[in-house]
Image (cartoon, grey):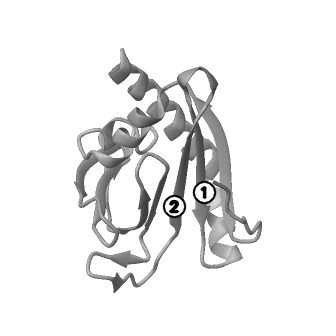
Amino acid sequence: MTLDLDPDTDLSFTRTLAAPRHLIWECWTQPEHIPHFFIPAPHKVTAVDIDLRVGGRFNTTFEVEGNVMDNHGVWLDLVPGEKLVFTDGYTEGWKPAPEPFMTAILLLADAPGGGTTYTAIARHRNPEARKSHEDMGFFDGWGTVATQLEAYAKGLAG
């Protein structure tokens, strides 16, 4: 599955993870797994609340350098084992967020050797929000998350 990307508002990368697709899906959709990979260490996820259905909540709480950050969002699209789309543009009940940041699209496909082709896309409402996210370290941060996800999922497989 491919999506048309807009270089003015979208950031993305694709990586092959050495873990099976069903485990990558499980890690992203089961709340007990999220704290193990979701933000770059040494930062921590301290709470997760998932209602895995379109319009269901995807809420996380982070601790970053002693600061608590609540992130509330919803699932926009779910194709089991293939695609997850979530946003902070709305909260549960389709309540618009006052200052949305992005919509995330994760695409999963089987890769040779039993791994997963993992594509992460961050869509932003305007070029300025995209640039801000890139300047915050999108590629390093999301790359670190992919590395943590791979290591964690491999541990589940073993």
Residue toward you, 155 or 132: 155
Residue kind at label 1, given as amino acid type: Ile
Above or below, comparing residue 117 to residue 92 in the picture: above
Residue occupying the far top of the picture: 158
- Residue drawn where x is 76% and y is 71% of the image: 8
Q: Is residue 15 left or right of residue 74?
A: right
Above or below, comparing residue 132 to residue 37 in the picture: below
Q: Are marks 1 and 2 in contact (CB under 8 Å)?
A: yes
**Residue 86 location, x and y as percent?**
43, 64
Residue toward you, 20 or 41: 20
For residue 121, which numbered disc appears in the image? 1
The 10 Å Cα crowd at callout 2, few under 14, some 14 to 19, many 20 or more, is many
Residue position marked by numbered label 2 in the rendering: 104
Q: Is residue 110 left or right of residue 156?
A: right
Examine the image and state in which quarter residue 4 appears. Answer: bottom right
- Residue drawn where x is 64% and y is 37% of the image: 15
Residue kind at label 2, given as amino acid type: Ala
The 10 Å Cα crowd at callout 1, few under 14, some 14 to 19, many 20 or more, is many
- Residue drawn where x is 37% and y is 20% of the image: 157
Examine the image and state in which quarter residue 94 appears. Answer: bottom left
